[in-house]
């Protein structure tokens, strides 16, 4: 009996081993998620001088929206026009896409396509630009 007990270790040792493995796996999963998000955000910033919030990047990914270089330039020009007019929170409409942009921070807050704007109502904006 003593041989069996000594080979198993204490309950505390087993619990510590299990919990530490779980924490390591959780950290690895978190690192992979953070890595993917940072790569996606970096790619979006490279496509446009604008920043994309975590929420906007997620929406673009979920909705399979990818911007061409020409669309990125038009979006950026639309945000610049909004800034020139003193708009802080702008709706930028382009092709079949709509973007809510925080103009002072140059940050796209969310993005959606025409199919998802069923109500055609946008709130918390103080101006709109058609790009």
Image (cartoon, rainbow, N blue to C red):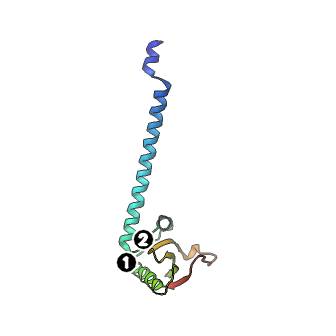
Identify the element where label 1 is drawn: helix
**Numbered tag placed on residue 51 in the rendering:** 2
Mark 1–mark 2 Cα distance, whole angstroms, equals 15 Å
Q: Upstream in the sequence, badge 1 or badge 2?
A: 2
Residue 45: horizontal and vertical position, in percent? 38, 70
Q: Could you classify mark 1 by the number of other residues whose Cα lies within 10 Å: few (under 14), some (14-19), or many (20 or more)?
A: few
Q: In this view, does 1 lie above or below 54?
A: above
Residue 65: horizontal and vertical position, in percent? 47, 71
Q: Residue at x 46, y 12 (%)?
A: 2
Q: In this view, does 26 lie above or below 88?
A: above
Q: Which of labels 1 and 2 is toward the front?
A: 2
Q: Which residue is drawn at 39% across and 76% down?
A: 68
Quick check: 31 left or right of 113? Answer: left
Q: Could you classify mark 2 by the number of other residues whose Cα lies within 10 Å: few (under 14), some (14-19), or many (20 or more)?
A: many
Residue 28: horizontal and vertical position, in percent? 41, 47
The residue positioned farthest toward the top in the image shown: 1
Identify the element where label 2 is drawn: strand
Q: Residue at x 51, y 82 (%)?
A: 87
* Tag count: 2
Q: Which is more toward the observer, 34 or 66?
A: 34
Residue 9: horizontal and vertical position, in percent? 45, 22
The residue positioned farthest toward the left in the image shown: 46
Residue topped by disc 1: 69
């Amino acid at each position: 009996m003593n041989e069996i007990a000594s080979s198993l270790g204490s309950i505390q040792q087993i619990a510590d081993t299990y919990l530490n493995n779980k924490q390591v796996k959780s950290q690895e999963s978190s690192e992979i998620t953070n890595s993917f998000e940072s790569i996606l955000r970096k790619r979006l910033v490279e496509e446009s001088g604008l920043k994309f919030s975590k929420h906007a990047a997620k929406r673009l990914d979920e909705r399979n929206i990818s911007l061409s270089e020409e669309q990125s330039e038009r979006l950026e020009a639309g945000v610049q026009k909004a800034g020139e007019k003193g708009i802080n929170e702008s709706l930028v409409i382009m092709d079949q896409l709509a973007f809510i942009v925080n103009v002072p921070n140059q940050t796209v807050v969310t993005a959606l396509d025409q199919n998802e704007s069923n109500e055609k109502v946008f709130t918390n904006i103080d101006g709109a630009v058609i790009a």
